[in-house]
Amino acid sequence: MSQRYDFELISSWIPERAKVLDLGCGDGTLLAGLAATRGVTGYGIEIDAQHLLAAVKNGVNVIQDDLESGLAQFGENSFDFVILSQTLQAMHNVEGVMREMLRVGREGIVTFPNFGYWRHRLDVVLGHMPVSRTLPHGWYNTPNIHLCTVKDFEDLCRTLDAVILDERVLHAGRQVNFLPNLFGSLGVFRFKEK
């Protein structure tokens, strides 16, 4: 479906004909792929005008909106899945966005770069902010404002009374089972409200 390993895992979790909301959908690649392979319906939400146009060209129903202002246009449990793929770290109000995901979706899926990955830790120890495949920007031009680790996200789910249904930590497309918070560069979580 895509070169993004989180997209492959997300696709495996979405059943056919599910109703999906993709927050921060970018160019709509994920939602377009899910529509083509799983027959899903739904919407993408994107704030960037160029990404919005690309999503429309990819055949995605997309709404231009700021996730930080909430999802008031959608009722409770309007979607089977609400996805936030590699966008969480760019949110100012992470807790508010997560609460809205839990409100409008039966399940949520979040992916994020794991700041606890050993190479990221080593970069910090050596005096530099990490730059990697999952954190591709320099400190001075990054959209990321809330970096977290796998353990941090688990703690946030507990704080929000969200039940983690599945948790995978990946590196280069492979699942990391041994010390995943240290050796995995990408966290992928599936959760729901308690």
Image: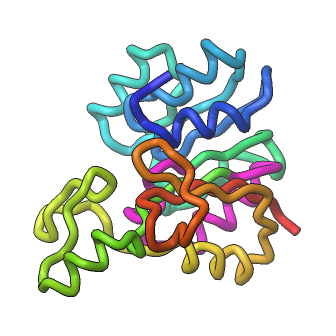
Examine the rendered structure and indicate whether residue 8 appears above or below residue 78. Answer: above
In the image, residue 5 sits, relative to residue 110, either above or below, namely: above
Residue at (47%, 58%) from the top-left corner? 112
Is residue 135 highlighted in magenta?
no
Vertical relation: 147 (above or below) 143:
below
Residue 26: x and y in percent read 39, 37
Q: Residue at x 33, y 33 (%)?
A: 51
Q: Is residue 139 left or right of residue 46?
A: left
Question: How far from the left and from the top, in percent, is residue 119?
Answer: 28, 69
Q: Is residue 51 above or below residue 186?
A: above
* Residue at the farthest right position: 194
Identify which residue is drawn at 27% across, 50% down: 133
Q: Position of residue 194 (x, y in %)?
A: 88, 69
Q: Is residue 98 magenta?
A: yes
Rendered image quadrant of residue 79: top right
Q: Which residues are magenta?
A: 84-108
Closest to the observer, 125 or 73: 125
- Compare residues 178 and 100 and report the one nearer the observer: 178
Q: Residue at x 69, y 74 (%)?
A: 157
Place of residue 68 in the rendered image (x, y in percent of width and height, measured from the top left): 49, 62
